[in-house]
Amino acid sequence: MATAKLIFRPAGPADVEALIGLYDRHYRGGYSACFDRYGPVTPQDLWWVQSEKDVTVVEVNRRLAGVVILGRAGKRLLAEEALVEAVPDDAAAFLRQLHEWLTRRFQEERQDALTLRCDETNAAALTIARTFGFTFANALLVAGGAPTSGREGDPASPPGYHIRRAAPADSRHLARLHDETLGHPLRPKDLDGLWRQADTRVMVAERERFPVGFLIAQVRDGAGRWTIGIREAHRRRGLGRALVHAAQQFFHARRVPAITIYWGTDTAAAAFVHALRARTERAYLYFERAL
C-alpha cells in the first residue's frame, strides 16, 4: 500500500469554513489557548490568528486533513496547534511526515528545540511526542466552576484586612503587585484600559491601608476570567478566597461561568485552585525535543 503524501500549504480564505469546522469538532467550545477565547471559534478569530501567526493547512489526497499553527513568544517558536483528522491507514508514516515538517520549520527559524503544545485529547500530537523522544515541559491548566448563586454565606475579609474597589489612583500599586506576585509587569496602557471597561472589576486588598493583594475579574467571550496576586507574607490567611468570591459575585450578576488559567508547574497556584475545589476543564501540555 502506497504511503499517503502530505502537502503543507499556507491557509487561505477558501479554507476558513473547513478550518473552523475542524477546530470546533476537536475542542467543542471551552477555552482556546491559541485564540485566547472561550467558546466556538469564528471567522473573525481566524483572520486575527492568520495576521499574527503562521497557519498551515495539511492535505492528504487534495483533502484538508489538518492544520498547524505556529506562534512566537519573542524569539521562541511554538507549535500552538497540530490538529489532524482523517488520518490515513498508514498513521505512522503520516505522523512521521508531520514531525519532519515541524522539525524543518523550527530549524529554518534557528530554534534549539522543537516545542509542541496540545490538549490532552489530541491523540496525534501526543503520539508524536511519545514516538520521537519529546520530554514534558509544562502544562497550562484551565479551571472553572459554576458561579455562586446569591449572596448568602459571603466570606468576610480576614481579620486585619480590607477589600475594596480599585480606582485609577491605585494603578502604580497594582502594577507593582502584578509584577511582584505574578512575575511580569502590567503595562500602563493595559491598566488604563481596565478603568474604562464595564465588564471588568478590579479589587485591591489592604492591610493598614497598605496594598497586599489584588483581583482582576473580566467578562470576555461569554465567560468570566479572574486573576489574583497576593504578597507572600499575606498568603494562606483566607485573603485569596475572599477575593475570588468577589469575582464570583461579579460574574454571577452577569450570568457567566468563571474560569482561571494557570501553569501546572506553579505549585502555589495549583494548591490554591485545588483548595477552591475548582474543576479542571482543559489541560494544554507542552513537550520539547532538542534540535
Image: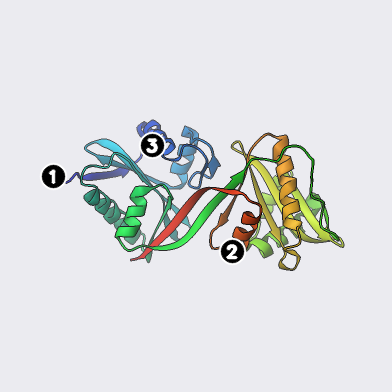
Give the numbered dot on residue 2: 1
- Sequence order check, earlier mark of 2 and 3: 3
In the image: residue 166, left or right of residue 93: right
Mark 1: secondary structure: loop
- On screen, 38 above or below 110? above
Characterize the local packing of mark 1: few (<14), some (14-19) or many (20 or more) Cα atoms within 10 angstroms. Answer: few
Mark 3: secondary structure: helix
Give the numbered dot on residue 22: 3
Residue 223 sits in quarter: top right
In the image: residue 203, left or right of residue 273: right
Q: Nearer the viewer, residue 263 or 167?
A: 263
Q: Amino acid at mark 1?
A: Ala
Q: Amino acid at mark 2?
A: Thr
Mark 3 vs 1: CB contact within 8 A: no
Q: Amino acid at mark 3?
A: Leu
Q: Position of residue 129 (x, y in %)?
A: 35, 58
Whether residue 23 is visible, yes or no, is yes
Whether residue 108 is visible, yes or no, is no
Query: Which mark lies nearer to you, 2 or 3?
Result: 2
> Which residue lies under the disc numbered 2?
267
Q: Residue at x 36, y 51 (%)?
A: 125
Q: Residue furthest left?
A: 1
- Screen quadrant of the C terminus: bottom left
Q: Residue at x 23, y 42 (%)?
A: 88
Query: Which mark lies nearer to you, 1 or 2?
Result: 2
